[in-house]
Amino acid sequence: MNPEQFAQALQAKGIELDDYKMKQFSIYFNTLIEWNEKINLTALTGKEDVYLKHFYDSITAAFHYDFNQDVHICDVGAGAGFPSIPLKICFPQLKVTIVDSLKKRIGFLNHLAEKLELEDVTFYHDRAETFGQNAKFRETFDIVTARAVARMSVLSELCLPLTKKHGYFIAMKGAQAKEELINAKNAITLLGGEIDETHLFTLPTEESERSIIMIKKVKKTAKKYPRKAGTPNKDPIE
């Protein structure tokens, strides 16, 4: 998917990219490739791959949720900024908070935000488990996103404690999502969530399968969650 095809595919979904936004995506790509030589940010370095499998894939969340409103997103384990930074470029009014455990990636994101002239973006170098227990952030976000970070049962423990009541945890997964969701149902309920919708689709041109899982926060999360760093992954809620 080249930049022109990228813009056309989004336009077909009702998302218009003007020249400034297209320039931002171009800067994003060039900055990502430049920094990728110093720190490991992505295995994908071809322009068509990045535009399809990172930029377009990130924005697919907006096909199922209206981001044309003032909402605060927390992106857990965003790595090189996916999905929240592409969403922020498309919907500049969004407020974005990213938490990532690797300091070098936070350094990249700070540099990137400056290059893209983004406002209302904040980056925290922290473990999601610690961040979720911080009273300043706990249950304060309208939307919490995570893209292929961990299994659904683990992700739910990292993300639902940050999601405010009546907000949404949006998990972006690959083809294995259905099985993961079955195994995560108890965890989602225990943590105060309710499975709202699951959207299955294939990416344009290459037809790889994707899933977007929408989980609504229906009640507060018990204070003991998330458990201490590392525990959700070692001992997932069953």
Image: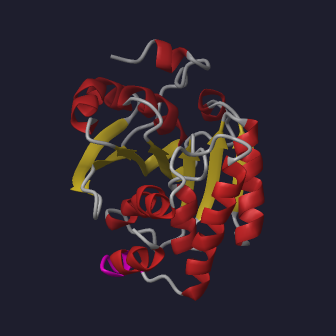
Give the quarter of the image for residue 100.
top right
Q: Nearer the viewer, residue 213 or 49?
A: 49
Residue shown at the point (60%, 44%) measured from the top left = 79
Task: Report the quarter where the C terminus lies.
Answer: top left
User: Residue 212: where, in percent of width, then height?
Assistant: 32, 50
Residue shown at the point (24%, 50%) measured from the top left = 197
Q: Nearer the viewer, residue 159 or 123?
A: 123
Residue shown at the point (42%, 78%) measured from the top left = 7
Give the quarter of the image for residue 53.
bottom left
Q: Is residue 90 above or below residue 208?
A: below
User: Residue 5: where, in percent of width, then height?
Assistant: 38, 76
User: Residue 3: where, in percent of width, then height?
Assistant: 47, 75
Question: What residue occupies the far bottom of the structure in this picture?
Answer: 19
Give the quarter of the image for residue 24.
bottom right
Judge from the rendering whether residue 214 lies leftward or rightward of residue 111; answer left or right: left
Judge from the rendering whether residue 202 lies leftward or rightward of residue 156; answer left or right: left
Q: Is residue 133 above or below residue 30?
A: above
* Magenta stretch, residue numbers: 10-15
Task: Report the quarter where the N terminus lies.
Answer: bottom left
- Give the overall secondary structure of the magenta segment: loop
User: Residue 174: where, in percent of width, then height?
Assistant: 32, 42
